[in-house]
Structure formats: structure tokens, C-alpha cells
Amino acid sequence: MVNAPAQADERERLRPQSADHGVLGTTKLNPFGDLHTMQHLSARLARSLRGLFESLLREELRCWAEPLVVQRFSDYRAERGDGLSAWLPMAMVSVGGPAIQDNAHALCVLEGGFSLSLIDLLFGGNGTAPDTLPGEFSPAADAMIRRLGGMMAEPLRRAWESLARIEFTAGPPESSPAMLPGLEGEDAMIVTRFGIAGHNRRPTMLDILYPVAALKPHGSALTGKVVDKQAEADPTWRGDLTRAVMTVRFPVRSVLAEPVVSLSRLMELKIGDVIPISFGPEVPVMVGGDLLGMGTVGTANGRAAVQLTSLARSAEGLAQNFHEGPVE
């Protein structure tokens, strides 16, 4: 379930005032304003993450996107505390469109206990995390966390594709944010948080952080209003339109023959002259300037008629082409 209501046992996000208000004499923390599109993007990503983690955890899950905030990286670190977490950088590279800041990285942050239980499952265990968490991850755990980042890269790319073509690549994870290159405490970050919960699993929070500076080229798109679903057409109006369209008339003709004569012969023609023609057992049947199919000439109800023996194009395709005009 996306954007499901928070449960009592879920960790609530503290919202420092510095995340919402600027201070005179300082750079504005959030230059975008209301991030409508970004919130919609997070809700779409939550649906993809649910499928990913259900396959890894082997159980049915709920996954939702919480309201995002913009805050300094130092404030986010203080809010998170000193417990073991996996800090996984995800390189962001723009493919066409506005360029992203060089060496830009998103940051996936996973709780240490959840990471270790997930690693235990990937190694064939039952998903049990140790009662006392270690101070850092083992090299094998680092490799598995990076593998998880590689699995998250495709859902991230798909979630962003309606806004920008961005490729994500997982880098080496760290147990301490102090070891992350290129991140300063004053850097403004868009913090998106996703909740993951199962029937017998306490809610776990997965955070994905995006640097504000890297997304400035997409600022206008990030603040746009998003309509998730198109309004359904009124059934009465749709029925009336369909009936009106079905009464449109098209010229249908059959070409028996197209003889060719010279200019001198044409100038000598007079009443009574005979122009010989020849045609095969089948003649073309045309709609406008398009070939509908082939048919045989005969009679029906005392009138000359053509019986269709084959169709070259569908009637729907011909009608559309007739409406739009011939292709140059």
C-alpha cells in the first residue's frame, strides 16, 4: 500500500524548523518550494520497492512513501543518531536533457538491523539479525549491500523517467557517513523516506537523499502539479461521439482498367470510337486514394457489384488515414 497511514510502532520523522524556514544572510535551504512532482515520484517508487523487497524477504509487504523534507545533511545525521546504518551512495548521471552536477550522488540509507537480516536471507538464512549490532559491516556484508543498491537502480530509473532520464549506479557502502566523499554538513538534501512492513515484521525505514544542488536544473519540473489519473470521459458524450463518427461517409470505387493512349490517338478520338481495355479476374477496390482490397465483378439484386475477395488494409486504418490526409 502506497502512502498508507503511519502505525503507532513506526519511527516518526522529527522535523527540525531549519528544514522549512530560511535565515537572513544564509542560502535558502529549499529553492524549489512545494515539491509536488517529487512527492508523486516517491509514491511511484514505493510501489516498485514493495515488489523488490517482497522478492528478497519472501513475504507480502506494505510499502509507503512518507512526506519528504529538505534539510541540511548535518541535521539529518544528527536526527539519525549513531546506530549502525548502511550509507550507500548512488551515482546520478543524466542521459540527455538538463545536465546534473558533476559527481552527483543520491544516498540510500538502510537501518543496520534490517540490512543484516536481509543479508542473512540472501546467504540462505532465516533473516535473523544479531541482538547486538556490530560497529561496522563485514566485507561480505558490504558486497551484499552494494548488490542491493544495484537492484534498486532500475526502480529508481523508472520512477524518474517521467521527469528526467537519470541513470543510477551503486557505489561502495560505508558504515559511517563521515567516510562519504563529496558530502558536507551544510549541503541541502531532499530526504525521501519509505516505510516497509510485513505481517510479523516491525516497520523499517529506508531513506533516499538527493542533493538539492544536483537537481537545480530540474527545478521547474520538480515543483509542477501532477495529475495521477486522467479523468474518465463521460459515457453519454462518448456514445454520442461514436454514433456521429459512424455516420461519416467514404467514397468507395472500383477501377476496372486504366488504358493508356498516345497524345495523337487522344486528339483523333470521336464519338463511336472504341478504346480496348483488359482486366484480370480481380479488380482493385479503392477508398479515397487508398487500396481497400481486391474483388470480382458481378451482379447483386439486378445491379452491377464487386465482391471482395481479399483485404489489403483494415477499415479502421483506412478511416484514420482518410481523416488525417495522405502522408507526404
Image (cartoon, rainbow, N blue to C red):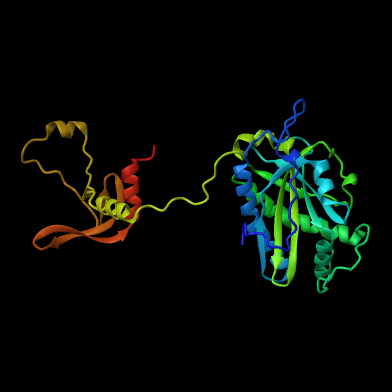
The C terminus appears in which quarter of the rendering?
top left
Residue found at x 69% / y 54%: 154
Rendered image quadrant of residue 5: bottom right
Q: Residue at 60% across / 38% down in the picture?
A: 221
Q: Is residue 229 left or right of residue 232?
A: right
Front residue (pair 15, 106): 15
Left or right, 143 with respect to 26, comes to right
In the depicted structure, whether residue 116 falls above or below residue 313? below
Tell me, yes or no, if residue 119 can be seen here: yes
Quarter placement of the N terminus: bottom right
Q: What residue is shown at x 65% (from left), y 50% (from top)?
A: 42
- The percent position of residue 102, horizontal first and vertical second, equals 77, 35
| Percent x, y of residue 196 | 71, 62
| Quadrant in the picture for residue 270 | top left
Expressed as whole percent of the image width and height from the top left, the position of residue 157 reads 67, 49
Figure disc tally = 0
- Residue extending farthest to the top is 25
Which quadrant of the figure has residue 149? bottom right
Task: Pick out the residue farthest to the left.
Answer: 272
Residue 281 in sight from this viewpoint: no
Q: Nearer the viewer, residue 63 or 103?
A: 63
Q: Nearer the viewer, residue 300 or 24?
A: 24
Percent x, y of residue 240: 27, 53
